[in-house]
């Protein structure tokens, strides 16, 4: 009897050890590891060349007003709210030269035209890491827009336009830069700022999606 009890206790201990080992193995598996999960997401190409040299002063989710104390842009611009995209700045030598803008993903064009506050705009439908999205490229020179609204699929890194001239109607009378916004869903959304921080959940931060 005592021998049977000892064997039973030993079996229970072995089962417990095996269960712990399997649990730890599952937690470290590629499916459950946050690091592996982040690496599995496809990174996108930058819309402007020399991305590592460019400043990104106004990032996703930043709250700005025309007050210099809350605005990284000098001089501050007129907008107020939480920024829904990523602003990518020009290099010093590009102020008077053409700066090509390229697509970050594959998909058809939903909109081309001019919008108050942006100047020229192109919006592209994309599936980004299994999330149907609309990608806005803002502050473009309208006469340079080389795509149109149709069912043709535009490949990543395709040239679609040039940046508009500094502080003209081409850029919505703002500085020369690119506003890159990603909105969840394939409907057209122009908002560059939202007044309620909760509304940012309808947008995606572009920066973590772009290649290092």
Image (tube, helix red, strand yellow):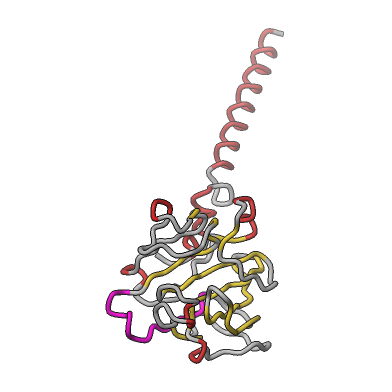
Residue 25 drawn at (x, y percent): 55, 41
In the image, residue 206 above or below residue 36:
below
Q: Residue at x 46, y 76 (%)?
A: 173
Decide if residue 29 is in sight here: yes
Q: In this view, which residue lies farthest toward the right?
A: 1
Q: Residue at x 49, y 82 (%)?
A: 169
Residue 59 drawn at (x, y percent): 46, 59
Decide if residue 157 is in sight here: no
Region rendered in magenta: 91-104
Residue 81 drawn at (x, y percent): 55, 56
Task: Give yes or no for residue 199 being in the magenta stretch.
Answer: no
Of 187 and 121, the residue lying toward us: 121
Residue 6 drawn at (x, y percent): 64, 13
Of 81 and 86, the residue lying toward us: 81
Q: In this view, which residue lies farthest toward the top?
A: 2
Of 38 and 119, the residue lying toward us: 119
């Amino acid at each position: 009897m005592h021998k049977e009890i000892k064997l039973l206790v030993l079996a229970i201990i072995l089962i417990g050890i095996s269960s712990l080992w399997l649990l730890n193995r599952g937690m470290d598996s590629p499916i459950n590891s946050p690091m592996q999960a982040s690496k599995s997401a496809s990174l996108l190409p930058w819309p402007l060349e020399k991305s590592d040299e460019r400043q990104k002063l106004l990032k996703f989710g930043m709250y700005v007003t025309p007050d210099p104390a809350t605005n990284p842009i000098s001089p501050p611009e007129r907008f107020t709210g939480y920024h829904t995209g990523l602003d990518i700045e020009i290099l010093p030598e590009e102020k008077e030269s053409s700066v090509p803008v390229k697509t970050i993903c594959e998909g058809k064009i939903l909109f081309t035209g001019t919008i108050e506050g942006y100047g020229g705009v192109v919006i592209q439908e994309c599936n980004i890491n299994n999330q149907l999205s609309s990608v806005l490229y803002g502050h473009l020179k309208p006469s340079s827009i080389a795509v149109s609204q149709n069912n043709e699929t535009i490949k990543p890194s395709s040239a679609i336009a040039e940046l508009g001239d500094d502080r003209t109607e081409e850029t919505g009378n703002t500085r020369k830069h690119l506003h890159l916004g990603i909105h969840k869903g394939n409907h057209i959304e122009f908002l560059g700022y939202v007044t309620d921080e909760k509304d940012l959940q309808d947008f995606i931060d572009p920066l973590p999606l772009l290649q290092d």
